[in-house]
Image: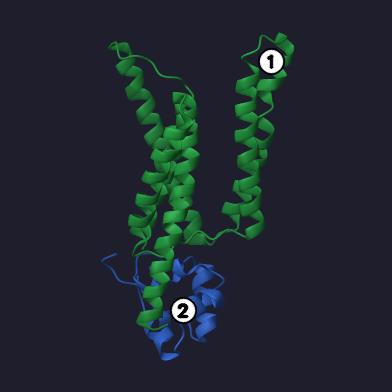
Amino acid sequence: MNNKSENQSSQGDARRGMLIGMALGMGIGAVIGLVLGDISSGFIIGMGIGAAVGYWRFRDTPIGMRYPPHLVRQLIISGLLYLVTLIGVIYLLEYNLNRSIEIILVLLPALPGIWFLVSLGRAIASLDELQRFIQLEGIAIGFGITAMAALTYGLLGMAGVPQVSWMYVPVVMVFGWFLGKMWTLWRYR
Amino acid sequence: MKNKLRQLRAERSWSQAVLAERLDVSRQTVNAIENEKYDPSLPLAFKIAHVFDLSIEEIFEYSEDQ
């Protein structure tokens, strides 16, 4: 491939990086917004950060992760279903329902959640060896960031800093995984 | 580990994308191997050798400093 087409490919990758960053930012922002009670601010902040990180990361680097389209569809549908059921359950819990119904309700989002995890596992298994290694390293970094953040904030709580909801833990986990993946992708560029 | 992947690819006028397709890996993986940032697994090294119709030793060279 000549330099021109390699450059065009890099520009295309940067655009794709921005779009992926925006999509991820929207997802993370939606959860942050849900926790903060202002979903629109979460969306905007998440999209902005995601687009900036996506452009910066992929400007000179080809994107490696290309999942089969049917698995991407499954990931999007299961992820959206999870968000919809989560929002629906939070809404329904405002009403004082029977305790047994409440227990069934709060377990409902786990179904699309399991579908999402199975799809994610299959998507990662479909990648080539370097991509799987990058994912693994990203997950390891994300795990470390989450553990360190949770422990540090736990200690800050002992020092009188106000406690936050445990719902931040999965948000930090996903964000840590994203950061870890970006870092590892950059190293293998 | 040093390798001659870029040189061999250029001799055949293959793009990274073409080689990636032949090896059934991503372009990023080909790029990382060419830039010697990633050493392929033994099965992938055999596949690379097969695609270029060479032996592994003719493509990859072990260096003591790595």
Which numbered disc, 2 or 1, marks the residue closer to the eye? Answer: 1
Q: Secondary structure at mark 2?
A: helix
- Which of the 4 quarters of the picture holds residue A36? top left
Q: Which chain is green?
A: A
Image colour for chain B is blue
Instruction: Tell me the residue at 41%/79% (across/down).
Output: A5
**Residue drawn 41% across the image and 32% down it:** A146
Q: Residue at x 51, y 79 (%)?
A: B18
Instruction: Provide the chain ID for the residue under circle 2.
Output: B
**Can you see residue A130?**
yes
For the C terminus of chain A, the image quarter is bottom left
Which quadrant of the figure contains the N terminus of chain A?
bottom left
- Identity, as a three-letter code, of the amino acid under mark 2: Ile
Residue A116: % across, % down: 63, 42
Question: Badge 1 sits on which subunit?
Answer: A
Using a 10 Å C-alpha cutoff, classify the residue at mark 1 as few (fewer than 14 neighbours), some (14 to 19) or many (20 or more).
Answer: some
Measuring from the top left, give residue A35's x and y in whole percent.
47, 25
Q: Are marks 2 and 1 in contact (CB under 8 Å)?
A: no
Say whether mark 1 and mark 2 are on the same chain.
Answer: no
| Residue at 70 percent of width and 11 percent of height | A97
SS label for mark 1: helix
Q: Taking A129 as reference, is A75 left or right? A: right
Using the image, tell me which numbered label, if any, was put on residue A102: 1
Q: What residue is pinned by disc 2? A: B56
Position in image of residue A102 (x %, y %): 69, 15
The alpha-carbon separation of the residues under discs 2 and 1 comes to 62 Å
Tell me residue B27's x, y (percent): 47, 70
Q: How many marks?
A: 2
* Nearer to me, B52 or B26: B26
